[in-house]
Each structure stands twice: as C-alpha cells, then as structure tokens.
Amino acid sequence: MNDTTLSFRPATHADTDALVALVESAYRGDSSRAGWTTEADYLDGRRTGADDIAECIDRPQSVLLIAERPGADGAAPELLACAHVAIEDGAGYFGMFSVRPNLQGGGIGKIVINEAERIAREDWKLPAMRMTVIDIRSELIAYYERRGYRRTGQIKPFPYGDTRFGLPKRDDLRFEVLEKTF
C-alpha cells in the first residue's frame, strides 16, 4: 500500500455503522484474529459503539480520521482504517486506531499514524502525541516504539465494571501512556 492509494477525510455521522464494524473487527471476536491487533484473548464485549463514534465526531479539537481507497469500477470508496486524533492536555491524543484485519501488516497503519501525527504537529502545532495501550500488549507496544513512541511509565487503571470498554477476561489489565515528541 502506498500513500497515493489512500485518501483521508474526517468521519461524519453517516459513517457510524461502518466505523463500529471496522473497530469491532480489528479488536474483538474471531474476525479480529485475522490481524495481529486482536484483544480477543483479554476482552469480550464491545470495543466501541455508536455513542463513542458520535462523541469523537462531535468533540471540539478532535477528528475521527478515515482512511479509504477508491472503490472498484467507480464504486463508493472502501473504508480501510480509522483513528481518533484529539487535543488533550497540550498534546495530541491518538486512539481508536483500527485497520481491517485482513490488511494488517501491509503498511496502511504506518500511513495512518503518519497522517495523524501530521495533523497534531502541523495543523494543531502540538509538541507531542500520546496514546494509552493495555500494558500487557508487548507486541503492540513494540510496534509503536519502532515508530518513535516511548513508554512513559505512567499507568492508568482499566475501567473494570464499565462495559463500554469491554468485558475483561483477566484481572490484571491496565493502560500505559506512550508518547512521541515532535
């Protein structure tokens, strides 16, 4: 996948159902096992919902970024990936990052991260990008470290009991903040 085959745009409420399906497919259930970002071994239940999508779209200083490629034979563009980029505490925040599982490992994720960082750095003039990652996800953390993120050591509790974040299969889940300075 190269940069010229992808186009980016902000999500609208009309994209909600497709975005929920994309995010769920990347993180939950058997379909997520086709990719390497699955959380199916750690969490059941939902990863996102229409309420989360609406919140990201409606939030000030925020964009829910869609990456798509042209549809075949003039069909509608094909949704490949998404990421939420927002301003939080004087830095960019990167979340809800999802690539279709059957396309993971093909370079789309790197292109999406680059665009999200460009928005934070150039459009919003922010000094850094942050994200939270479940700290037992060593392969995912290593992926971000290869892209210049560092582990901050800042830990945030997992919201046990809040089903909007899924149904934990283990009792040792927590988030670590990763950061990349520009």
Image (cartoon, grey):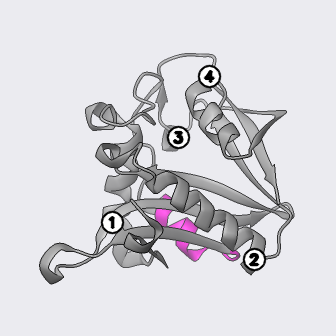
Identify which amino acid the numbered label 2 is placed on. Glu
Q: Residue at x 85, y 60 (%)?
A: 89
| Residue carrying label 1 | 79
Q: Residue at x 22, y 79 (%)?
A: 76
At mark 1, the secondary structure is strand
Q: Residue at x 78, y 50 (%)?
A: 180
CA gap, disc 4 to disc 1? 29 Å
Q: Earlier in the sequence, mark 1 or mark 2?
A: 1
- Which quadrant of the rendered structure holds the C terminus? bottom right
Percent position of residue 130, x then y: 75, 51
Q: Earlier in the sequence, mark 4 or mark 3?
A: 4
- Which quadrant of the rendered structure holds the N terminus? bottom left
Percent position of residue 42, x then y: 48, 23
For discs 3 and 2, the disc positioned in front in the rendered view: 2
Q: Is residue 159 visible?
A: no
At mark 2, the secondary structure is helix
Identify which amino acid the numbered label 3 is placed on. Phe
Q: Residues within 10 Å of mark 1 (few under 14, many from 20)?
A: many
CA gap, disc 4 to disc 3? 16 Å
Q: Do residues under tags 4 and 1 come within 8 Å of each other at their CB atoms? A: no
For discs 3 and 1, the disc positioned in front in the rendered view: 1
Identify which amino acid the numbered label 1 is placed on. Leu
Q: Is residue 143 left or right of residue 68?
A: right
Q: Earlier in the sequence, mark 4 or mark 1?
A: 1
Q: Earlier in the sequence, mark 2 or mark 4?
A: 2
The residue lying furthest to the bottom in this view is 74
For discs 2 and 4, the disc positioned in front in the rendered view: 2
Q: Earlier in the sequence, mark 3 or mark 1?
A: 1
| Residue carrying label 4 | 136
Q: Which residues are magenta?
A: 52-61
